[in-house]
Every structure is written in structure tokens, then in C-alpha cells.
């Protein structure tokens, strides 16, 4: 008999936990928590930083300022979506007291930052300045930020008004006052960032005094530091050393400013009271009218400075002052190898970063191409479904009254939409052609590509491309598809097209097809569907709330799911017959709001769209037999055949 | 343009529901309800009856009386389990005022009925008699029944004490008083059954008066009627006609008594004051000492009478007076084609019929062979997990102190266990042999079959048989397996061995293996597992709470799941690292409680079991890569190879 304990050879984590059995009953026994698919989703920003540093992963972050116009806001939000692809650890949005930063205007810092969190799923820091603002104002802003899902504040003093600045006795005079106020009023709720000045703040008595002041801000509760821009890596490295020397141990993130043009550089230097080193001036002055040349130089300079910082081993993350532009920063990041276009997604849909949506892991499939609308319509929910969608109650979706909310608006202006969707429609068939061109990628008869539809503001998803040929064929005949997915019987979770979730898993899908079509086709379709009764679930509705479905007991049907090592099953999308009725309202309204209204009232074009809106049905079909080839194309073939049969009555 | 609505050809259910969108936020937005896998599970008994009648499905039910001894209770419970296989709509348990029927004794009506509901998953009616009992006593019994999960009461008068019965002014004199009392105190909570007398109650003034009294019971709130036994189908059919004639519309279920012996017939006839028809007496008297002949005759007689009842088209269900015996009733049911041994299960484990467990659809795999222990240890939970097991809190399992609760006890007596597990053990290897014989089905060296182990009171499951060869091989070498399942990559849900849930679905499993083994083997195993780190999840513990696992964040791992048409994913079993620690306590204790204690204290046999208990580890392994051949056998092969390598240190 052997009597040694197996202490050698253990590769697992060992914890000497006592048995958890106990005689009490548990109120928590019905536990529906979300499995940790993406550990970072549950962490605070400071924890994410620490985890990255410990893992030796380098990261970057991006700074933006709020736009001046509503159109610029639309553009900025789609820039967020595009730049999110590169994998920033966070973005931050600056605060401009003159621009009504805490208001509900679509150009306010508050709204832009909350849109980034809620609709773009970005970890976001909202700047806030305290000078010339009352304690009550600041408290109100902070409450509002918290309510909107913001979890991080960059606490700044801000620029005093007028030339001569005087301390206000009762007011907030320094960033440290704001840090203290946040900790006092909101305890540990927010992660707090403060600014560091590698050359010392211009208003400071001395570099040393400024360092001591920085330490005060950290001691008051700041979690990390982002620095003002600088032009030489040694400037930052010296500053970092000096910070550490006086006992600042939190992360200090260098602020990187890729020079993008002569004028923007001059303006920034003036504002920040920094001096541009002579060697840079010498290069820039001769090419000051050549924007491309200056940008190229700026990228080179930034890349080499960032390399020096990273090579020092002391820098783990880089913060970029983007000036709301994409090209230069993206190029620097790509050349540094920090731009991580990882096609793998934690879930098939874009998750929101609002803390109350942390556990959300299942949504109806209908909003697949309109995730921002889904988030908007569910923003008032107190809890979000996880594990199961459930069928016990009708989910209360907020109404979508304003299709023109800047983050829901089409990125294309009216003129472009008219070119794509037809300056003039002559029949339902001209609508069929628009759908067909969107699917095929071919030019319409006026030579324009159709890159969006009212239900799909982006070109066809890669996954949908798998179904392109079949989709094209049916759209041509009046099956106007707006959402679809192929069936998948266990592809690796790392599959570049259909994969999602952690590696080592398998993903599955049931074939799904959703389309508008005429009542004539629906009549034939329903006859065909009798043959497929057990295999195909369908749901057919029109604008007048006629409603035909074979969903058993109005239960949701899981159409996407994944199996992962060491985890419970995840089923991120369902076809839910109850939610479909809410989606239907939105889907029908988009005909009118986004398409019909492009045309004059009473115009034939507008009447054609209105006719479709009034008379077509919205149909969804699920093929439950996911291991077999999808039968949905056969269902539609049979339908067309039935319609063309001579005995068809 | 077509303008007709698709009214023809609709094969689906059509409901003109308004849109469910609305502006309010929903408190119910996180909805974790269970999908309706088995509609009957959610229905009341009277709804089940109605559904069966509407569907034209014929059904049967079984009556039992409480046993006299604890051993008889053990036998009765395993009879319930065996007879449950045939698919009774319900069983009922009689009430004997003299036998302390409402007590907590293992032979009481209350305990037997609640065991049937909670542990055998049987819809159960508890009889209750009211005469000679106070209102307070009855109310207390009813509260207790409700608390125990009983939902159906058979309200009876009971037999008066003594020859001369007198009405008590304040008491409950008739069954109708009890019906009224239940409806008054418990509203619609219970389904109530009352007794009907096809020949009239012996104490009634007349047949007609008894019918009127029956109608009173129905009007007071009874949901259906079960009749006293009778000997001719025309007796029942006339009674049914008479019931309907006076306006009784609820179901009237005929009580069938297959004659099983001369003496039991005589006794019953005496009690019920019925007269045995002459044609039956003529047959029985000559063969009164030939039990087999009488039973055969009784079966024939019951079958032909039941056929006449069913053929009348007026009878949908048959209620059998079993006298706690199996053979005759089972034979009658099989010959009538009512015994439905449907291998399909709604879930892979036996569900409990307690109403609060209605939504339960996920359990840890560890109790797969001890479902009654799992139900016992979770009986105090207020809610049961569904959809997800979850990982947010440690589930509080009740402690299993009493391994001798009658429904947890081994069905085999001590002498048999000794024959199977060894009158005398000489080494750990003699224990290996017991496990190996259990798996292989071969006789042990003393010529006895090993049909159970402390962790498995039944012979090997059909599914486990698929792994028999591999299991035998590893048990022989000291991997003492107590639970396992093969991997399954999408078999039809109707598969006779591994299928479960509604038809048209697909079931999946990850390979699972759980075993006790020595620390020497564990040391080698852990070295081998490093190679499989991403593929295999393991959890290794011993009686001293040493605890080694690679489960990420102590998350549960789904190891059985099913995909069904029009439904959310069901994942009925998980390997949960937190619950495993509770199971471990029970699994180790079974060595001592069920095996070691068979031997004298200080005996070598007992010391061997004690040594294993103190020094072995309990190990579970999950192979996450379910679409590939299970690697768990390779893991164990590698382990044995490592152990036998000459350089092994």
C-alpha cells in the first residue's frame, strides 16, 4: 500500500476548501448567472490593466473629443465601431465646459461617452473638469454618468476662465478636489484617472512641485495616470522614474500624439504650452504645406518613439490623442503590432459595456443587423436574460419612436440612398431589384452599388455571403430577405466566419430566414409548410397584426448555441415569437421612415413602398434539423412551383 | 398587385394578438423559465385526465396500501419504481386511521405517498378519511400533505368505530363534509377525488339515495370519482348512465380488482359487503387451493371485463386495486396494451413530482445513480435551477446523516451484500475484483453475481454497457469507477439507449468518468493530464479535503444537452466543482456506512475499506471534445504506462 500524497505532478490549482455542504436551505438555489465567456467583461478598468500587465499583453487606448454637429456625431460613432475592431482597452471622451458637456444633446461629452459604452460596447472614460463648477453640478453629472453606465472618470482641473485665475474658497480649485469628491460621494464606484505632465504643468511652480501634486491626486484615490503628450521617449521615461521615486506606484500611461498636420500641431502646442523640439521643427517647417508628408513623418516619429517606450520594458499601454481621426493612429498601431483585428467574438452579437448588461448572453435574432436599436429599446430593463430567454412573460420593449436618433440613423445621406434605392420606383419589381442588388453586390440599373437597406446599414455579413446565390434567386422573385443564417453543425469556435466564444469550443446554428413577401406568396407558402410541419417553425405577421405561427406554446427557439470546455451551454440567439411582434413594428416602420419618406407625398414611388408596407407579410422560418442540409430553400422552391402550377387556384 | 389576404392554406394556429411593445420597463426582463419539455409535468391531475380523454389516450392508475414494516416500505418503494415504468397516470395510497396514517413513520400513508411524489416522480392521490377525526387534525394533515408536495386527496368517510355508528353533531360525518372543508380551507389547491359505489353504498338507504349523495360530493367540489370494485362491466356501465342521468359530468373511473387469490377475495368481499356473482363462485370454489389457477382466472376475468368497459367508448381510464402486488395487474395491463414501457424520458434523470420542482431541469451528474439522495439533500431548497446551473453561489446541500432512510437504503439485505462484496477481504485487490465483477456481470470467485455497489443500487445502466470493456479493464487495475457516460455527438432524441426529451431533437454528451483510486495512480494521472490540459477538465479530492481542479473559475461544465424543435437548449446535467465537494462527502461515507460496517470492528476486511476511505482519491474527468472519440481511456492508458515505466520515480 502506498501512503504518499500526490504532491508532485499537480498542474492544477490546488485549494484546500472545506466541504460546502450544510443543512440550511438556500434562497440562491435557482442560480442563473452567466458563465464567464470573456473574463474582462466583468472586470473594472484598473483590473483589466493589471491583468494585461501581468500577462505581458501590451495594449492601447484612444482619446476623442465630442463633435460639433449631429452629423459629425453620426460619423464619430461609426468611427468608434471601426476602431473598436482594433481592440482598444478603452477610449476616453474629453469634456468641454463651453459645449454643454453634461447635457442630453447628441454632441455632448456625456451622450457621446454613454453611446460608446452602451451602443459600441467600448470601455470608456469620461473626462470631467471641476473649476468654475459647483459641487452640486458635479455631483449631478456624476450621478448621470453612473446611471448611463459610465464607470470611469478622468478628473481634471480644466482651464480657468480669463487670464488671471484665482482660487475660489468654496469651489473646486484643483483636480485633487474632484478626486476627493468622487471618492467621498461615490466611494469605490468609479475608476478614476488623473493627468500627469511629463514636463510639469505649465502653471506649476516647478517640476518637483507638480510631481508632489500628482502624488496627492493618487493618494486622494486616483487609480492610474495618463500623461500629457510629449515629443521624446526619454521625457516620459524620466518622468516615470521620478514618479516612482516619490512613491507613485499606480500605472502611468504615456499619451502619444502622432503629428497629423502643421496647423493641428501648432494649435495643440499653443494650448498645452509645450515646446516642439528643434529637430522636429527642422523637419516640419520645410514641408508645412504638404499634409501627406507631415502625416507620414508624424507616423514614423510616433512609431519610433512608441517602440522606444515599449522596448524599455516599463511601458505596457499607450494612449493615443487621435484628434478624432483614424488614419494616422491606426497606421501607428498596425506598425507596432498593437492593432488586433481578432475576428473572434465573445458572442455572435456586439455586447454592450453597460454594467447592468454584464450578464446578458441571449437576444432575439431579429435585431442582428440593428443591435443599437435593440439596446435602445431594452435600455430601461432592470435585468437582462442570461442562460435562457424564457417564455414566462412578454418582454416589454420600449417603443422606437425616433428612427433618427443619431446612433440609429443611416450613415448615408438622402441623395446616396436615392441613388441606391431608386430615384423613382415603377413597380414592386423595382423594389425586388434593390434587394437583389444589395445581395449580389452588383450595380443597379443606374450604375450604383446598393450597400445598405433600411434593415441593414452595412454591406452583407461574411456569413450571409455563404447563402448569396440562394438569396439572390429568391429576392429576384419577391422574397425580400432581411435576415438569415446558414445551419451549422459543430464548427470550431475559432472559425473565422461563424466562430465566437473561447477557443476549444464548437458552435452550432439552425438555418434561419426572414423576409417580407406578398400575401399571394404567403398563401402558397403556408400550403407548402404543412409538409414540413415538424421540421420548420414559422411565424408570419403583417402590419395589421395578423399573426400565424406554429411555435409550441409561444416558446423561444434557440437558433445559435455554443459548447465550450469547462462551461455551461451558451445560446446567444433565439427566435422568440413574442419579441417578433415588437420587432415587426420596427421592421414595417422602416419601410416608411427610411424609404417611403425619401419621396414626395402622393408620388408613385412613395405609394409603392406604402403598398408593400400595408400588404406584405413579414415571415420568419427556422429549420430545426440543423445536422441536415437546410430545407428552407426547398420550401421556397416548392412555393414558387405551387404558384406557377396551372391548377393553382 | 395582389390584394387578398392569405386566409386559405393556413395550417398554423392563428391569433390576432396586438403588438406587445410598450414603453414600460419590465421587472421580469430576466426570465429563466423552463421550456415545456413535458406538458403533463405542469398540469393538475384533472387537466391530465381531460387532455388524455380529448386525445383519445387510454390510461390506468394503481392503488396501494401503506406497508406494515420498514422493510416492506423499502420493497413497496422499489415496486413503485418498477411499476412507474408502465406509465400509470397516478397512484393512490390508502389511509388507515389505526396505522397512524399522518405520522412521520416510514410506514405511514403520508410518508409513503410523499415518497411516491418526491422520490419516484409519481402523480399521487393521498386518501383521507374524516369520521372520528377532528377538524383541526384534518386541517393539520392537509397542511402537511401540501407541504410535502401532495396535490390530490381522495376524500372518504372511513369506517366508523364500533358496530353502531352515530352522527357527531360537530364532527365530520360524511365525505362531503371533508370535500367542503378542503375547498373552504385550501380553495382550489387540491384536486379532490371521491368514491362511487356502483351497487350503492352498503350503508345507504337506497341506490338512488346514494347517487344523490354522490352528486352532493361532486357539487361540493370533487373533481372526479373512482368507483368501488365490481364484478360485471354492465354494473359499472349502468352506474355511469345513472350518474349522468342525475347530472354528474365529471370523470367516473371504474375500480378494477383482478382476483388474485381465494382468501384475499373473501376478505375484500367481507369488507366491502359486496356479493360475488354465482358464475364466479362456481369457477373459484373448486380451485380454491390452487393460487396460480385462481390468479390466471382473475387475470382472464379482469381482461375481459376491462375490454368490455373500454369497448363501450364510455371509459377512458381504469383504476386497479393492486393489493400491493405486481404480477396480476401488470399482466392485465400488458394484455390490454395499456402498459407503456416507453424508454423515452423527458430528461435523462427521473424527475420529481413535487410542484416546487416543476421547473427543475438541471442537476449535477454525481447523483446519477442516487437520485433519491439528491432529492433528499435538496428538499429544503425554495427554488430549483433551470436553464443554467449557475456558479454565483455555493449550493447548500443538506447533509446526508442517515444513510438508512428507507428510500435510500439498499434493497439487498446484509447477507446478500456480503456474498457480493466478499465475506472477507484480503487486500485492496479483492475490492478491485468486486468492482470488476459488477461491471462485467461475471460471478465473483465465490460464485455470486455482484448486482450492486454502495454507489449503484441497480445493475449497470444500458448506456454504461456501451463502455463495459474499457471499464472492466481499468477497474481490474484499481480505477474503481462509480459513474460514467460515453460521449455522444448528436443522436436522435428518440434513441432507445441515450435518447430523452421530445421527438425530433438531438442529444449530446461529453464523455465522463468518475472513480476512486490510489494516491500513486493520482500522482501519475496528474502528470499525464498536463498533456490534455485544454481538452480534459478534472477534479480530484480526498476525504481530507485535498482538492485539485482545473475548472475555470469553478464554473460548471455542461455534460449532457439536447436541441429540440422550437425550443431553447436543455442541459440537464453538469459537472459542477462546487457540488462535487458535497457529493464527495457522501461518496466517501458510503465506503464506511454501506461496506465497512458489514464487518466486525478491527477486522482486516473493515480495515481495508477504512484504508481506502482514508487514502484514496475521488476523481472526475470530462473530455470536452465531444465530437471526437473519448480520450479518457487514453489518459488512463498513459497513466498505467507511466506507472509501469522503469524510470518512474
Image (cartoon, coloured by chain):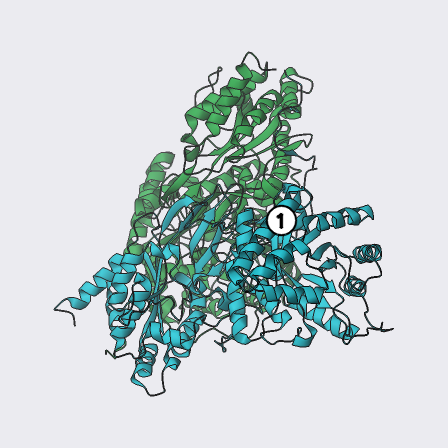
Chain colours: A green, B cyan
With respect to residue B439, does B409 lie above or below? below
Left or right relative to B247: residue A192: left
The one of A513 and B447 positioned closer to us in this rendering = B447
Dividing the picture into quadrants, the one containing residue B118 is bottom right
Residue A432 visible in the current orientation: yes
- The residue that mark 1 highlights is B306
Helix, strand or loop under label 1: helix
Dividing the picture into quadrants, the one containing residue B453 is bottom left
Crowd band around label 1 with a 10 angstrom C-alpha radius: few (<14), some (14–19), many (20+): many
The one of A397 and B295 positioned closer to us in this rendering = B295
Q: Quadrant of the N terminus of chain A?
A: bottom left
From the top left corner, tell me how far across and down residue A354 is, in percent: 54, 53
**Chain assignment, label 1:** B
With respect to residue B316, does B460 lie above or below? below
From the top left corner, tell me how far across and down residue A573 is, in percent: 51, 44
Left or right relative to B437: residue B312: right
Q: Quadrant of the C terminus of chain A?
A: top right
Residue occupying the far left of the picture: B646
Amino acid at each position: 500500500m502506498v501512503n504518499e500524497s500526490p504532491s508532485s505532478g499537480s498542474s492544477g490549482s490546488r485549494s484546500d476548501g472545506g466541504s460546502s455542504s450544510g443543512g440550511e436551505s438556500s434562497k440562491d438555489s435557482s442560480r442563473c448567472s452567466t458563465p464567464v465567456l470573456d473574463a474582462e467583461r466583468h472586470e473594472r478598468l484598473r483590473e483589466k490593466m493589471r491583468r494585461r500587465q501581468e500577462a505581458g499583453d501590451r495594449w492601447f487606448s484612444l482619446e476623442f473629443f465630442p463633435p460639433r454637429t449631429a452629423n459629425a456625431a453620426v460619423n464619430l460613432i461609426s468611427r468608434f465601431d471601426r476602431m473598436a475592431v482594433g481592440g482598444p482597452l478603452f477610449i476616453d471622451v474629453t469634456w468641454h465646459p463651453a459645449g454643454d458637456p453634461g447635457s442630453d444633446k447628441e454632441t455632448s461629452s456625456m451622450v457621446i461617452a454613454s453611446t460608446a459604452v452602451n451602443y459600441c460596447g467600448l470601455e470608456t472614460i469620461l473626462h470631467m473638469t471641476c473649476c468654475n463648477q459647483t459641487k452640486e453640478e458635479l455631483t449631478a453629472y456624476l450621478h448621470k454618468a453612473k446611471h448611463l453606465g459610465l464607470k470611469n472618470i478622468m478628473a481634471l482641473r480644466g482651464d480657468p476662465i480669463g487670464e488671471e485665475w484665482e482660487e475660489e474658497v468654496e469651489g473646486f480649485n484643483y483636480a485633487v478636489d474632484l478626486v476627493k469628491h468622487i471618492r467621498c460621494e461615490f466611494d469605490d464606484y468609479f475608476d478614476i484617472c488623473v493627468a500627469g505632465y511629463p514636463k510639469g504643468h505649465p502653471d506649476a511652480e516647478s517640476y518637483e512641485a507638480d510631481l508632489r501634486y500628482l502624488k496627492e491626486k493618487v493618494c486622494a484615490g486616483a487609480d492610474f495616470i495618463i500623461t500629457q503628450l510629449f515629443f521624446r521617449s526619454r521625457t516620459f521615461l524620466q518622468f516615470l522614474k521620478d514618479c516612482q521615486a516619490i512613491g507613485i506606484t499606480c500605472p502611468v500611461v504615456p499619451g502619444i500624439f502622432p503629428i497629423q498636420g502643421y496647423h493641428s500641431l501648432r494649435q495643440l502646442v499653443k494650448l498645452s504650452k509645450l515646446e516642439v523640439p528643434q529637430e522636429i521643427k527642422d523637419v516640419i517647417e520645410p514641408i508645412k504645406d504638404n499634409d501627406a508628408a507631415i502625416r507620414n513623418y508624424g507616423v514614423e516619429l510616433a512609431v519610433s518613439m512608441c517602440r522606444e517606450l515599449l522596448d524599455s520594458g516599463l511601458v505596457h499601454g499607450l494612449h493615443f490623442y487621435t484628434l478624432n481621426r483614424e488614419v494616422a493612429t491606426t497606421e501607428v498601431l498596425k506598425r507596432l503590432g498593437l492593432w488586433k483585428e481578432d475576428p473572434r467574438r465573445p458572442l455572435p452579437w456586439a455586447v454592450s459595456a453597460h454594467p447592468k448588461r454584464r450578464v446578458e448572453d441571449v437576444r432575439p435574432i431579429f435585431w442582428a443587423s440593428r443591435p443599437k436599436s435593440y439596446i435602445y429599446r431594452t435600455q430601461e430593463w432592470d435585468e437582462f436574460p442570461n442562460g435562457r430567454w424564457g417564455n414566462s412573460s412578454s418582454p416589454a420593449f420600449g417603443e422606437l419612436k425616433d428612427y433618427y436618433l443619431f446612433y440609429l440613423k443611416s450613415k448615408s445621406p438622402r441623395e446616396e440612398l436615392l441613388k441606391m434605392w431608386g430615384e423613382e420606383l415603377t413597380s414592386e419589381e423595382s423594389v425586388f431589384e434593390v434587394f437583389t442588388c444589395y445581395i449580389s453586390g452588383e450595380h443597379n440599373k443606374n450604375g450604383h452599388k446598393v450597400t445598405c437597406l433600411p434593415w441593414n446599414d452595412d454591406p452583407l455579413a461574411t456569413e450571409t455571403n455563404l447563402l448569396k446565390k440562394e438569396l439572390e434567386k429568391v429576392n429576384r422573385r419577391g422574397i425580400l430577405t432581411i435576415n438569415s443564417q446558414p445551419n451549422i453543425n459543430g464548427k470550431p469556435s475559432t472559425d473565422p466566419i461563424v466562430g465566437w466564444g473561447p477557443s476549444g469550443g464548437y458552435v452550432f446554428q439552425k438555418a434561419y430566414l426572414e423576409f417580407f413577401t406578398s400575401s399571394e406568396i404567403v398563401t402558397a407558402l403556408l400550403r407548402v409548410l404543412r409538409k414540413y410541419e415538424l421540421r420548420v417553425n414559422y411565424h408570419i405577421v403583417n402590419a395589421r397584426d395578423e399573426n400565424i405561427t406554429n411555435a409550441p406554446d409561444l416558446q423561444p427557439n434557440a437558433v445559435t448555441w455554443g459548447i465550450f470546455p469547462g462551461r455551461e451551454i451558451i445560446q446567444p440567439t433565439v427566435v422568440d415569437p413574442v419579441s417578433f411582434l415588437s420587432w415587426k413594428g420596427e421592421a414595417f416602420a422602416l419601410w416608411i421612415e427610411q424609404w417611403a419618406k425619401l419621396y414626395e407625398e402622393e408620388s408613385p414611388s412613395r405609394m409603392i413602398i406604402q403598398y408593400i408596407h400595408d400588404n406584405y407579410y413579414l415571415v420568419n422560418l427556422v429549420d430545426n434539423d440543423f445536422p441536415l442540409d437546410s430545407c428552407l430553400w426547398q420550401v421556397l422552391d416548392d412555393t414558387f412551383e405551387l404558384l406557377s402550377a396551372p391548377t393553382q387556384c
